[in-house]
Amino acid sequence: MGLIEAFKNLYFTSGIGEIINNFLDGGYKTVIMLALSCVLLYLAIVKKYEPLLLLPIAFGMLLANLPLANLVAVKETVEEPGLMWYLYRGVAFEIFPPLIFLGIGCMTDFGPLIANPKSLLLGAAAQVGIFGTYVGARLLDMTPWFSFTQLEAAAVAIIGGADGPTAIYTAGKLAEHLVPTIAIAAYSYMALVPVIQPPIMRALTTKKERSVVMTQLRTVSKTEKIIFPIAVTIFVALVLPSAATLVGMLMLGNLIKESGVCERLCKTASNELMNIITIMLGVSVGATATAEKFLDLKTIGIMILGVCAFALSTAFGVLFGKLMYWLSGGKINPLIGAAGVSAVPMAARIAQKVGREENPNNYLLMHAMGPNVAGVIGSSLASGIFISMLGSLVG
């Protein structure tokens, strides 16, 4: 009898027993979330969809939905919170995303942007998709199926910038309860940039436009590369202080790289520190994706808005590229406008690939890197605009 009681106690204190005994009261949602996390792990490992962040996010989701494990127990409900509660402080206190930007700055060459300042306009044009998606979210709020407040609409709209850390940072500021859904949507769609962008690029351009060969960019001096991050930081901090955190860390990383006197710091920020923060950010964000927060109609709405945001950003970038093609007398290939989304350097590589399909002698990569880098700055500024305009509504 004692052995039977022992097995009964083991069953009732196990996660399996918790799911079975409460299946109709929410246990089925746990099964769905565990299955979804396994699907995301498959996409990260087998399909290689943004694996550096999608894998830890998916595994964090897996950990969060293991019943009775208490890995994400919060301080308000238990005396000793779970591991993920401590890790998530890096997101809640807005530490991880800026540190990611520091590493990105150390790995990014702003030379193409400095050599061709007009590419700033292409990066800005691609951000129109962000504001268009904000309007779309507010329109969805008028339907009986979806509900998006101004803060939630702004947080979701940043997905259109194709910038995961910025999306997480903005959501943390404006709609923290949507961080996991927005993060998963942002990185899932970033991984699908090679699928989403080319059809839009081809539909909006002619063969003649896609075949344009652009002239080689001028050589940018070391002095210019050092002055640029300093000047941008000062300008952004004075004009839009709410964007200074992300832009400032991006520019600090780039200054460390271009100065040539901080090789050890550059190596650490772009490798060891970047990798550590990526793991902690991904796992902690994924761990907030519990069944209660994730499985609702709003998640479906965010997924729909996310793909629309990417499509709009790509379309506006290409259309502005067509305008520049016309104004330059056919010297600018409009495909580089699609790189205005800040998926660095993936979007620039897509522009290069589509251009070479029409003309094997077409080398657009460096030209596309200008709008691509401008897109990183642009999405940070868009985030700052939303935070400045709507931040007073938080709480």
Image (cartoon, rainbow, N blue to C red):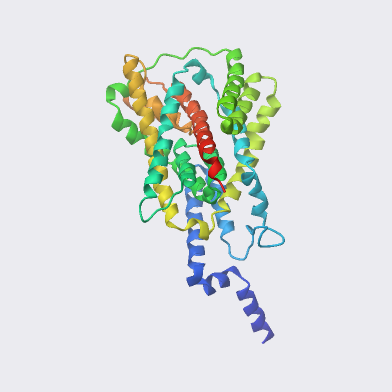
Q: Residue 295, image x and y in percent?
A: 47, 58
Q: Residue at x 71, y 60 (%)?
A: 80
State whether residue 114 is above or below residue 25: above
Q: Residue furthest bottom?
A: 1
Q: Is residue 376 left or right of residue 260?
A: left
Q: Residue 352, image x and y in percent?
A: 41, 26
Report the quarter where the N terminus lies.
bottom right
State whether residue 370 is above or below residue 128: above
Q: Quadrant of residue 91?
A: top right
**Residue 227 visible in the shown view:** yes
Q: Is residue 182 left or right of residue 244?
A: left
Camera-nearest residue between 274 and 27: 27
Q: Residue at x 65, y 77 (%)?
A: 9
Number of numbered callouts drawn: 0
Camera-nearest residue between 277 and 319: 319
State whether residue 210 is above or below residue 314: above
Q: Residue 90, image x and y in percent?
A: 65, 44
Q: Residue 320, image x and y in percent?
A: 36, 25
Q: Residue at x 55, y 48 (%)?
A: 176
